[in-house]
Image (tube, grey):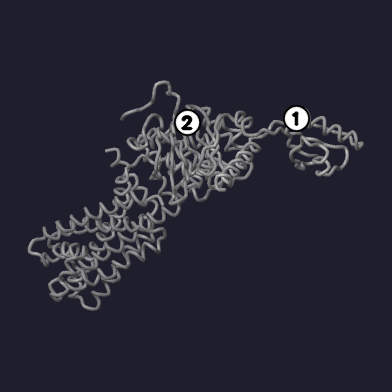
């Protein structure tokens, strides 16, 4: 089997070049390019309908692409589809194991499909049930598990053949807070043990907490990529101030008296101010308080969050689209 | 070899999940068994002539229905995606699914035949021809069921699609009346039906006599039809299994 790793790119596990896919007139993916390096968690972010699942389906061989090149672990998607399937583990957005089979049998059956010898299947099943804290559910049919446990077993099933890279499509979608937290800890542990992860999500907090690098996809177009810090700095020009005054103040008063404040959001007992120039805004806010006999209880400068950057990117992309249309 | 082993895994899992379950076993046995008994009670001498047709009908309905139901159900529940994501060729998946549905059809037909032998004194004049008819019929009908399953989304759609073909086939394939007794004008239609050749193989197996001078003729035609069905199933799976 031919491996086409290029010189100096030994650490690239997944390379996507100018990937395009259309459904009729709808361009779902428009010349998308990105790389995922060995050992990292790469988050593929985008709002609903951005094309994240389409990308994962193409990478995992479920959907045909229209244009573009994809190599995974050095194998070409067209010429080595079976090698690629052996190298990847896929967790779809819906937990989809065999409802009537027990947890153990589900894992062992998938081990058979991936060609694991019997001894290895048994060993892997025991290891994964322990790792995902499902040992006491080993003999329970998949349909008898809670949603959170189903999700865990689905992720365990994708790891049964020890893939090089794991594709996770919205892994925590629809889970309660404890299940989400424990699943995130598991993903970090899986990555720590050497599995590269491609994570699709629209949850900014999740991406910020888990990902080493990320890419943002909007309407089928990859608009930016980099570390969370890089993207925050690049996408959002505005900094934020969190202010608590000693008495009630109206939002309009702040906006009228502080020109450097771009927007005001109420949060708990105070405000979050999006500001164009931090120093000027600080002076204006403190001056406004002094002139009106209000005490500033606290004022904290905060960097823009990934969510701010994401929203700013979506808005600017929508503006661009509107300009293109007009 | 690896792919064959994986096809056998698919087959074994399908037996665990579907074909080994009591409702399917009883459905596969009761329906033809009761029909056969009804014919025997009405006219004991006629059952021998009808038994090849009823066994072929069991194969036709059992195999096309079960293979279509299983795949449509797995499409709906998302578990078919598991097979598509695994390092399996499309042909491996089809082989596994065909083997499970085929073995189900063959085993229910064999149990029915053994019952007829012990309870009603049925004799097999040419057992080889009989088994060949069962195997080739099971393969062809399972593959046609698989093809139907990828053309639709819901189980009822698969059943509707197949019934459109299956019921007319019953009346033009020598199930209830031997081929030689059809009027000349209908003979081309009878000979165009794939079920005719399966019935003929089973008829030679049971009575030693058939419409064709040589049993190799229906055997060759059924083999050819199973190859066509394989191609249809493979192309259907390639084009529509993930939809």
Name the foreground residue: B21 vs A203.
Answer: A203
Name the foreground residue: A36 vs A259.
Answer: A259
* Element type at mark 2: strand
Residue A77 x %, y %: 37, 36
- Residue A100 visible in image: no
> Are the residues under marks 1 and 2 on the same chain?
yes
Chain letter of mark 1 equals A
Q: Is residue A78 above or below residue B178?
A: above
Residue found at the very far left of the displayed protein: B213
Which residue is identified by label 1? A278
Number of the label disc, if any, that sits on residue A35? 2
The residue that appears at 56% across and 30% down in the rendered structure is A226
Residue found at the very far top of the displayed protein: A8
Mark 1, Cα crowd under 10 Å, few <14 / some 14-19 / many 20+, is some
- Residue A267 visible in image: yes
Name the foreground residue: B163 vs B32.
Answer: B163
Q: Is residue A88 above or below residue B83?
A: above
Q: Is residue A219 left or right of residue B216?
A: right
The part of the image, by quadrant, that contains residue B151 is: bottom left
Q: Is residue B211 left or right of residue A215?
A: left
Mark 2, Cα crowd under 10 Å, few <14 / some 14-19 / many 20+, is some
Residue B173 x %, y %: 20, 68
Residue A283 x %, y %: 82, 30
User: Which of pointers 1 and 2 lies earlier in the amino acid sequence?
Assistant: 2
Task: Give the distance between the C-alpha atoms of the residues marked 1 and 2, in whole angstroms.
Answer: 35 Å
The residue that appears at 31% across and 30% down in the rendered structure is A1
Chain letter of mark 2 equals A
The residue that appears at 21% across and 63% down in the rendered structure is B194
Number of the label disc, if any, that sits on residue B207? none
Q: Is residue A190 above or below residue A100?
A: above
Residue B11 x %, y %: 33, 48
Q: Is residue B73 left or right of residue A190?
A: left
């Amino acid at each position: 089997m031919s491996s086409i790793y290029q010189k100096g790119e030994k650490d690239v596990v997944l390379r996507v070049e100018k990937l395009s896919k259309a459904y009729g007139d709808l361009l779902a993916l428009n010349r998308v390019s990105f790389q995922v390096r060995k050992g990292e968690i790469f988050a593929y972010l985008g709002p609903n309908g951005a094309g994240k699942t389409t990308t994962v389906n193409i990478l995992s061989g479920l959907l045909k692409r229209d244009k573009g090149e994809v190599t995974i672990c050095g194998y070409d998607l067209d010429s080595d589809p079976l090698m690629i399937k052996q190298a990847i583990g896929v967790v779809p957005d819906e937990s989809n194991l065999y409802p009537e089979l027990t947890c153990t049998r589900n894992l062992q059956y998938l081990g058979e499909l991936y060609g694991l010898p019997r001894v290895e299947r048994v060993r892997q099943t025991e290891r994964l049930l322990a790792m995902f804290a499902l040992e006491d559910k080993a003999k329970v049919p998949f349909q008898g598990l809670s949603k959170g446990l189903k999700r865990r077993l689905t992720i365990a099933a994708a790891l049964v053949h020890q893939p090089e890279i794991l594709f996770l499509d919205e892994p925590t979608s629809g889970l309660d807070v404890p299940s989400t937290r424990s699943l995130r800890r598991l993903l970090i542990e899986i990555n720590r043990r050497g599995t590269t992860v491609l994570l699709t999500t629209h949850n900014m907090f999740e991406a910020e907490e888990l990902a080493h690098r990320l890419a943002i996809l909007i309407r089928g177009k990859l608009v930016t990529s980099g570390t969370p810090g890089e993207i925050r700095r690049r996408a959002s020009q505005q900094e934020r101030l969190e202010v608590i005054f000693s008495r009630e103040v109206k939002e309009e008063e702040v906006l009228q008296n502080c020109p450097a404040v771009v927007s005001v959001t109420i949060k708990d007992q105070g405000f979050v101010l999006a500001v164009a120039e931090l120093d000027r805004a600080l002076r204006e806010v403190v001056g406004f308080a002094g002139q009106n006999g209000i005490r500033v209880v606290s004022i904290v400068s905060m960097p823009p969050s990934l969510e701010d950057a994401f929203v700013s990117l979506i808005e600017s992309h929508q503006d661009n689209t509107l300009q293109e249309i007009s | 070899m690896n792919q064959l082993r994986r096809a056998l895994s698919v087959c074994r899992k399908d037996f665990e999940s579907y074909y080994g379950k009591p409702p399917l076993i009883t459905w596969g046995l009761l329906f033809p068994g009761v029909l056969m008994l009804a014919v025997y009670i009405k006219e004991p001498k006629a059952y021998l002539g009808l038994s090849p047709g009823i066994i072929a009908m069991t194969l036709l309905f059992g195999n096309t229905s079960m293979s279509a139901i299983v795949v449509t159900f797995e499409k709906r529940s998302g578990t078919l995606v598991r097979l598509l994501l695994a390092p399996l060729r499309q042909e491996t998946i089809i082989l596994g699914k065909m083997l499970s549905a085929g073995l189900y059809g063959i085993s229910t037909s064999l149990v029915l035949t053994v019952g007829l032998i012990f309870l009603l004194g049925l004799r097999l004049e040419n057992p080889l021809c009989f088994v060949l008819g069962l195997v080739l019929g099971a393969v062809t009908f399972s593959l046609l069921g698989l093809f139907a399953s990828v053309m639709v989304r819901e189980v009822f759609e698969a059943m509707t699609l197949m019934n459109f073909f299956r019921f007319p086939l019953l009346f033009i394939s020598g199930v209830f009346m031997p081929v030689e007794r059809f009027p000349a004008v209908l003979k081309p239609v009878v000979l165009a039906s794939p079920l005719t050749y399966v019935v003929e193989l089973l008829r030679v197996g049971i009575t030693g006599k058939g419409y064709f001078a040589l049993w190799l003729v229906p055997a060759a035609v059924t083999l050819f039809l199973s190859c066509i069905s394989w191609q249809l199933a493979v192309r259907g799976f390639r084009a529509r299994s993930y939809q």
